[in-house]
Amino acid sequence: MTRRALILVDVQQEYFSGPLSIQYPPVEESLANILSVIDAAEQAGIPVAVIRHEYPADFPVFGAGSPGQELHPDIAARATDAWKPATKSWASIFAGTDLDEWVRENDVDTLTLVGYMTNNCIIGTAADAEPRGLAVEVLSDATGAINLSNSAGSAPAQQVHETLMVLLNSNFAAVDTTAAWQAAELRHASEALGL
């Protein structure tokens, strides 16, 4: 039987205002879905890890102790002592953290990823999970991307997000919606109870 952990990736204030504001799906919608997934996970007894990105205090984004580095208030209000906290400074949740050990201690074999950004920490974590023997689920409407523009070109957030969902679903993760994931969890719980 699958043993999941819900991983809240960087649901931090930096993504709700300023240059890193999530553009697609609309951040209010993805946040509502994240909160809904938290409720479902806690009802099902799924362990939760809450990850925050952090750079040194003088960095312009995610600076240690800055308002942008804080969890979104709705996430902070729901956090419990049972949640596994971690702070990272790389795209993958595993780099420089003890999350691999926490996953093993909890007999987790599947990570359900929600949060930000699709084009950095979600894809980075999904790729890093593969050599660790972990399955990954990404909830397309509980994650989000920003508009990208650099020396290689530009792409709007919707294109970035949708393309990365296709890419993730091709090899690195099972991509689904919040509603479909919750329905599957309800079925698994019923089966486990013999209903």
Image: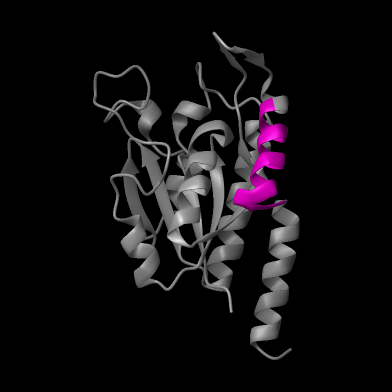
Which corner quadrant holds the N terminus? bottom right
Is 157 a magenta residue? no
Measuring from the top left, give residue 128's x and y in whole percent. 45, 48
Residue 84, by quadrant, is bottom left
Measuring from the top left, give residue 147's x and y in whole percent. 62, 19
Residue farthest toward the top in the current orientation of the protein: 151
User: Which of the pair 137/178 is nearer the observer?
Assistant: 137
Q: Is residue 22 visible?
A: yes
Residue 152, by quadrant, is top right
Q: Which residues are magenta?
A: 160-176
User: Which of the pair 81/61 is nearer the observer?
Assistant: 61
Colour scheme in the image?
one colour
Measuring from the top left, give residue 17's x and y in whole percent. 52, 22
Measuring from the top left, give residue 157's x and y in whole percent. 66, 24
Left or right of 58 in this view: 155: right
Left or right of 126 in this view: 139: right
Is 171 a magenta residue? yes
